[in-house]
């Protein structure tokens, strides 16, 4: 291994560790790593820029603006409360409603945004019916990570994979949404069993839930209609962007620009506050670090190991990538993992002589579903733990991981079945 | 003018192991918005305002719940407040308390009260609690100069 390859690998590993241990903000860690690699010419600056995937970044920015404006209207909380109210206060049904609403919203919103918007409303409702909020909070984290698996915009690994592999929004719906729904149903059933004691108690729920007035959550109807219009435009655009030969980022950016142009909000303020600039910087600089791994041959080495292991056994290779990425992303930042592994997936498909698409799909399944494993897997998990603490209960790292890893194993088992049935015969 | 000339020399204060319920009685009886918390040596170790008590009776995630008007009233707030009232002052007081010295100027006090969003703050002499200064004292004493009959 050359000196520069060692340097790139060392910077990548150090960055991952700094992020996982919380020693440094992730944007600072990747900025430091990328700057060092460019300063010492491990990857020359002019090459580094080429590795920044502006399609992913544009899509992130566009979605952040639209979702930011939409979330100010109270519509997401309205949907959550309306659905919970429809259960009539039955506790297991309320749990199922929370799981499905969270998962569906998370398929179109970032996981963290979903959990931040929905969980305070859910806890306040659950406390109203005097039930322990912890199972609901944990369930929300799981549902947000699983729901995010279903679409191009649901979870950042999918943005990276979609952009890298030129998958359209509809490709994700066709290849990932059905299996995600099955996984959600299985995990929801498993959680109902797991938390059966908490759900068995009686509560004064029905009449209290009936008195909840969700209409008070909508503050500005005209803003809501315009924002919903922009979101519908973007979703319709996502449905046809591949036919128009437009990248998804252009659709999202156009939608956000039109929305900013027609709503009476301070555009500068929205751009400043709703676009999470540290996240954008994190992505851009992470792409540079991964570029260094690619340029120095580290990625080819990893791909080499995988292809010798699985030569002539393509189905085994798919299942191995699914489980490896799922278990790795329980503890490692899934964006960093995916940004690296898209290259490995491409190399591997070439050297095993198999179509690349299934390799990317198992990577997406593994990287997104693995997020449930521990607090390190997804920021949404940390947020629900914080929310539990604020409402007077603690979810320890260990306690979350014990349930989380079981959920990951259940999810990956269902995904394995899907992968075998879907691609096992055609390889 | 200096704080020493404007301050209220009333030494009403509570100790850290007073209950919140008792502290609320003192606040109500004196019609003030906050109380210094002093230890046995008379040193100011904290400050408890009505804001701290109201906040303690709200759920911990209230700042993320942008609106609570959709929730019907089942005594959630009253129940929490009852629970909080049995706890001690030490648990909810502000520990990084802002205090003034008698020789601080009125300009300095006015600025700090506004920038730190305080209604009332303790005044100390050699670290020992000597009285309080509030926004109301500041305005009233300067404009009406209660202590200087010549004015």
Image: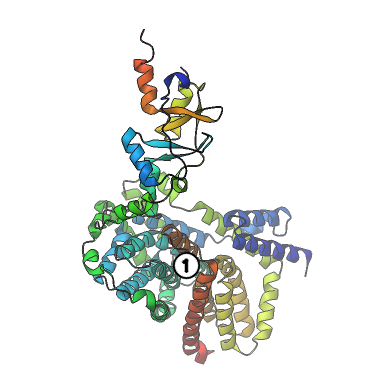
Q: In which image quadrant can residue A343 be found?
A: bottom right
Q: Does residue A51 appear in this view?
A: no
* Residue at figure coordinates x 50%, y 92% from the top left: A425
Q: In which image quadrant can residue B8 be found?
A: top left
Residue under mark 1: which chain is it in? A
Q: A4 or B45: which is nearer to us?
A: B45
Q: B116 or A22: which is nearer to us?
A: B116
Left/right placement of residue A390 relative to residue A264 reads right
Q: Secondary structure at mark 1?
A: loop
Q: The N terminus of chain A is located in which quarter?
A: bottom right
Left/right placement of residue A172 relative to residue A359 reads left
Q: Does residue A7 appear in this view?
A: yes
Seen in the picture, residue A346 relative to A125 is either above or below; the reply is below
Q: What is the image's colouring?
A: rainbow
The image shows residue B69 at horizontal and vertical percentages of 26, 53
The image shows residue A84 at horizontal and vertical percentages of 29, 68
Left/right placement of residue A280 relative to residue A46 reads left
- Would you call the spot at circle 1 few (<14 residues within 10 Å), some (14-19), or many (20 or more)? many
Seen in the picture, residue A124 relative to A149 is either above or below; the reply is above
Q: How many marks?
A: 1
Q: A93 or A326: which is nearer to us?
A: A93
The image shows residue B47 at horizontal and vertical percentages of 45, 38
According to the picture, the residue beneath numbered tag 1 turns out to be A155
Hey, which residue is sitting farthest front in the picture? Answer: B40
The image shows residue A368 at horizontal and vertical percentages of 50, 72
Q: The C terminus of chain A is located in which quarter?
A: bottom right
């Amino acid at each position: 291994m050359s000196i520069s390859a060692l340097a790139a690998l060392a910077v990548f590993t150090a960055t991952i560790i700094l992020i996982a241990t919380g020693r440094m903000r992730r944007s600072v860690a990747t900025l430091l790593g990328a700057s060092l690699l460019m300063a010492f010419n491990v990857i020359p600056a002019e090459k580094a820029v080429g590795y920044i995937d502006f399609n992913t970044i544009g899509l992130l920015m566009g979605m952040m603006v639209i979702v930011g404006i939409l979330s100010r209207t109270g519509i997401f909380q309205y949907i959550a409360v309306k659905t919970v109210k429809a259960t009539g206060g039955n506790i297991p049904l309320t749990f199922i409603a929370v799981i499905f609403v969270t998962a569906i919203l998370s398929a179109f919103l970032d996981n963290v945004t979903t959990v931040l918007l929905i969980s305070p409303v859910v806890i306040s409702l659950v406390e109203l019916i005097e039930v322990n909020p912890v199972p609901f909070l944990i369930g929300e984290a799981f549902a947000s990570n699983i729901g995010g698996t279903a679409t191009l915009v649901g979870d950042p690994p999918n943005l990276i994979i979609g952009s890298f592999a030129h998958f359209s929004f509809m490709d994700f719906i066709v290849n990932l949404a059905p299996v995600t729904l099955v996984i959600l149903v299985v995990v929801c059933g498993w959680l109902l069993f797991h938390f059966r004691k908490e759900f068995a108690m009686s509560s004064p729920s029905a009449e209290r839930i009936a008195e909840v007035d969700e209409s008070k959550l909508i503050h500005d109807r005209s803003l809501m209609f315009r924002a919903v219009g922009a979101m519908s435009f973007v979703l319709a655009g996502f449905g046809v962007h591949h036919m128009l030969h437009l990248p998804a980022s252009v659709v999202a950016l156009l939608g956000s620009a039109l929305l900013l142009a027609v709503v009476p909000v301070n555009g500068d303020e929205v751009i400043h506050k709703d676009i999470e600039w540290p996240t954008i910087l994190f992505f851009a600089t992470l792409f540079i670090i991964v570029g260094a791994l690619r340029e120095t041959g580290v990625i080819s080495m990893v791909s080499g190991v995988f292809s010798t292991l699985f030569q002539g056994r393509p189905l085994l290779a798919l299942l191995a990538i699914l489980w490896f990425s799922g278990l790795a992303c329980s503890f490692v930042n899934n964006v960093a993992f995916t940004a690296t592994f898209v290259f490995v997936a491409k190399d591997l498909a070439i050297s095993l002589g198999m179509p690349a698409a299934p390799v990317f799909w198992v990577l997406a399944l593994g990287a997104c579903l693995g997020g449930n494993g521990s607090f390190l897997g997804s920021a949404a998990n940390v947020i629900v733990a914080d929310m539990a603490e604020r409402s007077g209960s603690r979810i320890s790292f260990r306690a979350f991981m014990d349930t989380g890893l079981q959920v990951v194993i259940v999810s990956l088992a269902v995904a394995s079945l899907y992968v075998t049935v879907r691609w096992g015969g055609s390889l | 003018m200096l704080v020493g000339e404007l301050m209220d020399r009333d030494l009403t204060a509570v100790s850290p192991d007073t209950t919140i319920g008792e502290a609320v009685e003192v606040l109500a009886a004196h019609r003030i918005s906050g109380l210094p918390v002093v230890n046995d040596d008379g040193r100011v170790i904290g400050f408890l305002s009505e804001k701290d008590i109201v906040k303690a009776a709200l759920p911990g995630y209230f700042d993320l719940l942008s609106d609570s008007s959709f929730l019907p009233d089942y005594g959630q707030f009253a129940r929490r407040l009852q629970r909080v009232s049995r706890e001690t002052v030490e648990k909810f007081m502000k520990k990084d308390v802002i205090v003034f010295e008698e020789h601080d100027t009125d300009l300095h006090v006015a600025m700090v009260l506004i920038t730190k969003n305080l209604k009332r703050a303790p005044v100390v002499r050699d670290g020992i609690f000597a009285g309080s200064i509030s926004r109301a004292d500041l305005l009233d004493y300067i404009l009406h100069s209660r202590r200087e009959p010549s004015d």
